[in-house]
Amino acid sequence: MQKVFIIGGTTFDHIVQLPQLPQPVPQTIHQAAFHEGTGSTGSGKALNLHKLGVPLIFYSVLGKDAYGAYIEKDLAAAGVPAFYDYDPGGTERHINIMDATGNRISMFVTQSSEHIAYSVQPIQAALAAADIIVLNIISYCRGLAPMVLETRKPVWTDLHDYDGKSFYHTDFINAAQYIHLSSDNLPDYRSVMQRFISGGKKLVVCTHGKAGATALTPAGEWIEQPALLHYPMTDANGAGDAFFSGFLFGWMQDKPIKTCMQFGAVCAALCIGSAQLVAENLSAGLLKREWQRNF
């Protein structure tokens, strides 16, 4: 199987579970389920793809602090091949407030620095060894976009809740041929997807949470995939990265796009049953068995 280089995206997340999101009034909440651990989009993709047996290497930026040490140890224990640079500003941390249906309020307690002293040689070696590059939309990854472009290799990016016009995303859009994004801030997501395809992108996939996902090909084919809502939900964090990973797993095996969408839906459904970023029992075998059971 081809090798993937995942660039960027580790945080330490504090996750609070409530029956419903709090109303905008002063209040005291006396009891709430709580857990914490490794988060962010690069970690989620690396953990899911690794469990699916995809050869990969992961690069990210951590602080030299207890949060960074936890993430580094956690990913090493999971067997994820990774290397890091260090942020003098510390490890990025989020507080996520979740309701019972998977809706989220995410607060960035600290943010990664935009400018990092990159370890250029290891990054160049990982780029040279990769067949597919995943460039995540973390601010410090922007400075690596020119190096990524120089490789002329397939580049995937996940724009998350892109609003269709944000300048922040421009460098990542320009670097990638394959785009995933969410419709959270895109009421007219189809027009944005069509704009990307008209601009030369090779594939666009837009996820809609509980409403499933939509793909658009350069041939103008629209492919819809409902979410698998009959799986139990513990925590919706990481479902989008699990979908991305399941989709890419199918893509790397030359599966039809419809099958890739189904793999993504299964991987996301398995993910929400875990409090972590990846289902503990995820494997290529489980994914394929669940795909056969559902489709």
Image: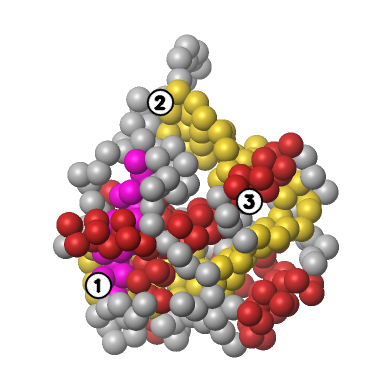
The reply to whether residue 68 is in sight is yes
For the magenta stretch, what is the residue range?
Answer: 257-273
Characterize the magenta stretch by its predominant secondary structure. helix
Secondary structure category for the residue under label 1: helix
In terms of sequence position, does the residue under pointer 2 or pointer 1 come before the other? 2
Residue at 77% across, 40% down:
65
Q: Compared to 177, does 112 lie above or below?
A: above
In the image, residue 269 above or below residue 250: above
Tell me: 5 left or right of 19: right
Mark 2 vs 3: CB contact within 8 A: no
Decide if residue 57 is on the left or right side of residue 254.
right
Which amino acid type is shown beneath numbered disc 3?
Ala
Residue that badge 1 annotates? 258
Q: Is residue 213 above or below residue 218?
A: above
Instruction: Write down the residue under mark 3.
Output: 76
- Tell me which numbered mark, 3 or 1, is placed earlier along the sequence: 3
Residue drawn at x 60%, y 47% is 77
Is mark 2 in CB contact (under 8 Å) with mark 1?
Answer: no
- Residue 2 placed where, x, y %? 49, 78
User: Which structural element holds mark 3?
Assistant: helix
Q: Position of residue 146 (x, y in %)?
A: 69, 79
Give how far apart the Cα atoms at labels 3 and 1 are. 34 Å
Quadrant for the C terminus in the image: bottom left
Nearest to viewer (mark 2 / mark 3): 3
Q: Amino acid at mark 2?
A: Leu
Which amino acid does the dot numbered 1 rest on?
Answer: Lys
Q: How far separated are the C-alphas under marks 2 and 3? A: 31 Å
